Image (tube, grey):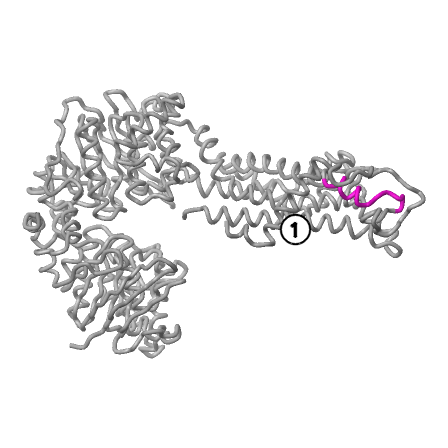
Amino acid sequence: MSALRRPGTMLAFVFLAVLLLAAAWPSLFSATDPNSADIQQTLSPPSAEHWFGTDQNGRDLYARVIAGVRLSLLIGVAASALALVAGTVIGVLAAQGGRATNTVVNRLLDILLSIPGLLLVLLVIAVLGAGTWETILGVALITTPGYARVVRGEVIRIRGAVFLEAAATLGWSRPQIVLRHLVPNALGPVLVLATIGSGTAISIGSALSFLGLGPQAPTAEWGAMLSSSRDYFTVAWWPAIFPGLAITATVLAITVAGQFLQLRLEGRAPR
Amino acid sequence: MTSLVEVENLHVGFGKVHAVRGVSLRVAAGQSVAIVGESGSGKSVTARSLLGLAGRGSTVRADRLEIDGVDACGLPEGKWRRIRGRRVGFVLQDALVSLDPARTVGAEIGEVLRTHGTVPRADVDSRVVELLREVGVPEPEARAAQYPHQLSGGLRQRALIASAIAAGPALLIADEPTTALDVTVQAQILQLLAARKATGTALLLISHDLAVVSSVADHVLVMKDGVFVEQGPTRAVLENPQHPYTRQLLAAVPVAHARGTRLSPSAGENVAQPRPVIGTDVVLAANNLVKTFALPGHQSVKAVDDVSLELRASETLGVVGESGSGKTTVARLLLGLERPDQGTVSVDGAPWSASAAKEQRELRRRIQVVYQDPLSSFDPRYPVHRIVAEPLAVAGVPRAARRERVAELLGQVGLDADVLGRRPGQLSGGQRQRVAIARALAPRPRVIICDEPVSALDVSIQAQVLDLLADLQAQLGVSYVFISHHLGVIYHVSDRVLVMKDGRVVESGDVEQIFHHPSHEYTRALLAAVPTLDGLAVRPRQSSEVAG
C-alpha cells in the first residue's frame, strides 16, 4: 500500500479516474460539440474561449481531445481484454494439451511473434478494412501471443503444485480443477501485463489512426488529430501538442498503475 | 583454554522487532556449544551475528563481541570477510540451496581456498580432493567434478562442511546441519562434526532438536524469545532441566516414555491419551502394489514393489522409511493420484484403484490427505473458510450448511473463529496444519493419509498436532496412514508399522514388536541411528514431578 502514497502513483490513478469520467460523460468536461466547425476561427491559438486552441477546420481542440478519450480507452481496454481471453485459452491449451498441441501452438506463436507487430496489424486492416473494431481486432491479434506465452509459462509453473493435487483428492474433476484453481492462479501476472498492455494498445491504435487506418473522419481520435496537425505544424503547434500530450499522459498513467499492481501482486505472494 | 567466541550482552534488532535480547556466550577451542530453540527464538540470528550476517535492516549491539581474538564490534564489511571462512566456517541447513547450482562442488570448495590463499594456487585441486576425503566423501576425485544436484543429500552436506573447513577455521558454526537429512545420514554427519571437534575445532551448533544436540554438544543454551532461558553442561540440562520451557521441550519429544500419553503441556503432565478400540472391518486395503517410473535413457525405477497393507477402523498404520524408500508413492497410490501398474487398492471393500475416474471421484471423500507443508496444499487465493469448505462445495452442500459445518470443524481442530477470514500465509505453522486437518475431516472420511504432517513443525507444535490427531481418532474413529521418516513420531502414533526400503516393505507388524524386537537388519540400523536423549528418556517425567 505504501506505493500508493507515492505522489506519482497517486497522480496516475487520479488521472485515470478523470479519464474514465471523461469517457463516460464527456459533457461534464466540455459543452462544445467536438465536430462543429467555425471557419472564422481556424487554427486560433489557445485562449480563454478555446483552451487548447482550434484546428484547421476551426473545431475546438479541447472538446476533441475530451471526445477522443472514449475511443482511445475503448481501443485499449477492448483490445487488451480480447487478447487476454484469447491468450489465456491458447496458453492453457498449450500447457495442458498433449505434446502435439503444445508444439503446434508454440510454433504458431513463434511465427506471430516474429512478424513485426505494426506490419501484422496493417495486414489485418488490409483484409478487413479500416475502422475502430478492425483496429481493436488487429491490436488484439498482435498482443495475444505475449499473453499466451505468459499464461502457458504460469500454468506449467503451477500445474505441479500440491494444492492442485489436494483439489483432486477432494473430488473435483480435471476440468473443474483447471477452471477453479489452475486458471485463476495463473492469471495474476497476466492481469498486470494486460493493464500495462492496454497502454501499448492505445499507442498502437493511435499509430494506426495516424496512418489513417483507424477510426475514420470526422471522428475525434488522438492519432488522427495528430496526423492532420502535421501539415500546419510550422504555423500552429497546438493541434499537435495537445493530442500528443493526451496519448503520452494516458499511456504513462496506465503503465504506472500497472507497475503498482505488479508490486502489490509480488508483495502479496507469500513465497 | 583460548576462547574463540566471547559475546557479552548481544542485542540484535530488526526495526521494532527485538530478536536477540542480551545474550552472552563463550566457545572455547575444542568445545562444542549448542543453541537450542524453536523457530523465532533468535537462535539463527545469534549465530549469524557472529559472522556479521545478521541480515538487512538489522542493528547489532554488544558490550563485547570477539571472534577468534578479533574485536568484531561494529566491524566494517571488508574486515568481516577476513573472518568468514578463515576464522569461522559456516554450515547451513540445506546444502542444495546453499551450494551454487551452476558450479561443481570442487570449484565451490576451491574458491574458499583461493579467496583466503591458504594453499598455493597450484595445490588447490589436490587440497579440494583431500578435504572431500577428510569429510568422508567416497571417490573424492569424481565427486569434485560433480554438481550439487548430482549428489545425495548426505554427500552435499559433507561437501558443504568441506567448504566450511577449507580455510582451516578454528570455529565451525552449523545452523541445523542435519535437519534436512535422513536419520542414518544424520548420524553420519553428527559423527563427522564430532570428529572435527576431536581435532580441536570449536563447534557452535544451532538446532531445534535436543536429541540431535545431546550427542555432540558439551554445553547447551536453551533459547526462547531472544534470551537464553537455561544453560549448562548438556547432561545437566537434559537430566535436570530447571526452566519450565526446557522441561516443556523435553516433554514434547516423542520418545519412548511418552507413548500412550499426551505430548503437549496444556494437557498437564503425563496425561494418558485415550485410544479408541480398533475395529474389525478393513477400511483400506492394498494388495501387491507395484509402481514403476520411467527414467530418462530407457531406464526405469520400481518406486513401489509388491506392497500390501490393511487398515482397520480407528487404527493408525505407521509407514516409516528414508527418502527414496517409496513411502510417498504408496501414499499417492492409496489416494488414487497414481494408478498402480499391478495390484489393487480397495476402500471400504469397494474397488478403488481400478475404477474409472468418475466412480473414483464418488469415493474420494472417504480417503483424505494431510500434507507436510499445508501452505502449498492450499489455493493461495483462498481464505481459511473457503479452504475448509471446499470439500463440502464439491459435495454440493448448500452455503448455509457449509458455514455451520466449517464452524464445527474449526472447533474440532481447536481454532478460533477469527481465523476464518484470514489467508493461510497469515497463520502460524501449527494453525495451518490445523486448517489442513479441518479440511481433511470436512467430508467425514474413513481414512486420512498423513504424509509427514509434523515434519516441518517445531517440537512443541508437533506435540499439539499429534495430540489433536489422537483426540480426533478417539472421537471420530477415523483411521490414519501415518507416513514419516521420524521414528520417534512413528512409535508414538502407530498401532502397526511398515518399514520401507527401496520400494519394498522390509518389515511390518505391531509397533512394540518392531521397535523392541526388530527382525530385519535395516530396521535395526534405522533404530540405531536415531539420536536419543542419551538414555535420559525417562528423566523429563521425573523432573516434572519434582516441579509439579
Which image quarter holds the N terminus of chain B? bottom left
- Comparing B181 with B469, the one in front is B469
Q: Amino acid at mark 1?
A: Leu
The residue beneath circle 1 is A252
Residue B445's quadrant in the figure? top left
Q: Is residue A217 visible?
A: no
- Label the magenta part by its dominant secondary structure: helix
Query: Does the segment drawn in magenta span residue A65?
Result: yes
Residue A211 is situated, as x and y percent measured from the top left of the image, at 80, 45
> Residue shown at 24%/48% (left/top)?
B458
- Comparing B5 with B304, the one in front is B5
> Residue shown at 66%/47% (left/top)?
A15
Q: Residues within 10 Å of mark 1 (few under 14, many from 20)?
A: some
Residue B312 relative to residue A118: left or right: left
Residue B16, relative to residue B435: is it above or below?
Answer: below
Residue A226 is situated, as x and y percent measured from the top left of the image, at 80, 48
- Comparing A97 with B465, the one in front is B465
> Residue shown at 40%/62% (left/top)?
B56
Residue B104's quadrant in the figure? bottom left
> Residue shown at 41%/60% (left/top)?
B102
Query: Does the segment drawn in magenta span residue B191?
Result: no
* Residue farthest to the front, as pictured: A48
Residue stretch in magenta: A56-69
Residue A250 relative to residue B234: left or right: right
Residue A38 is situated, as x and y percent measured from the top left of the image, at 91, 41
